Amino acid sequence: HSDARVRSVVALGERYHVDQQQANHVKDTAQRLLEQAGDALDMPADTAVLFLRWAGHLHEIGLDIAHADYHLHGAYVAANADLPGFPAGEQQLLSFLIANQCKRVGEQSSGLRQLAHRDDARLLAVILRLAVLLNRNRSSAELPEIGFEVEGRTLTLTFPDDWLLANPLTEADLDREQDYLSVWAYRLSIRRC
């Protein structure tokens, strides 16, 4: 028995020419971060993994429309496409995650107010954002072991010191991310080991 939602996500990805390799990197990174988040979510872990993987698979669908604000185009498509198997609330969550994968975070036009698990949706969006950011260079090289801890509204990423030195643009993006996440009252801490 296959999940109709999986078929819907795959079909939408094919329609909008998803870069499968990049999508896989983002999905895998997001899942590794989520596994380290512990019990920070109220929703079941298997549900959280599914949504992160689906959003990771579809995070670039807006690029087929335009490069500028591709995340918003992708969110619009995800919110309004015919996605068999997805109840309206689940489709809104998927759209919210895609909309908030980069740049400034927001909630006004994303339907978050109607979602049952608002705090979980925000944390899943943060994890997706970090996975997208960490894979910004579109490299096929493996990421190093990255630690991720969630304690309330404090998030801590731990990197090997030499990796951050070798990736100064990613480090600059992480610094900017600290400001972006403060809108949702998250404090992002970067640690080197």
Image: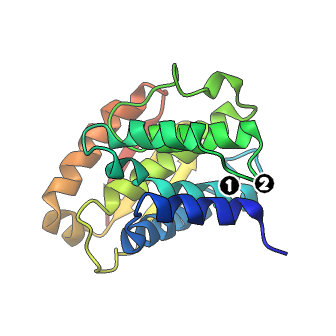
Measured from the top left, where is residue 38 in percent x and y?
Answer: 66, 57
Measured from the top left, where is residue 46 in percent x and y?
Answer: 74, 62
Taking depth in this image into account, of 76 and 137 the one nearest to the observer is 76
| Residue 89 lies in quadrant | top right
Q: CA distance from mark 1 to mark 2?
A: 6 Å
From the viewer's perspective, is 165 left or right of 7?
left
Image: 183 above or below 175: above
Measured from the top left, where is residue 43 in percent x and y?
Answer: 76, 47
Disc 1 crowd rating (10 Å Cα; few below 14, some 14-19, many 20+) is some
| Residue 44 lies in quadrant | bottom right
Taking depth in this image into account, of 110 and 130 the one nearest to the observer is 110
Image: 173 above or below 137: above
Check disc 1 and report the residue beneath it: 48
Verify CB contact (< 8 Å) between mark 1 and mark 2.
yes
Measured from the top left, where is residue 150 in percent x and y?
Answer: 56, 49
Q: Quadrant of the C terminus?
A: bottom left
Check disc 2 and report the residue beneath it: 44
Q: Can the viewer see residue 34 in this picture? A: no
Residue at the spot 41% in from the left edge and 64% down from the top edge:
18
Q: Please, what is the three-letter code of the amino acid marked with disc 1?
A: Ala
Residue at the spot 55% in from the left edge and 37% down from the top edge:
96
Q: Please, what is the three-letter code of the amino acid marked with disc 2?
A: Pro
- Picture mark count: 2
Residue at the spot 48% in from the left edge and 27% down from the top edge:
185
Residue at the spot 54% in from the left edge and 28% down from the top edge:
110
Image: 13 above or below 100: below
Instruction: Point out the residue furthest to the bottom here.
Output: 141
Q: Quadrant of the N terminus?
A: bottom right
Judging from the image, the colouring scheme is rainbow
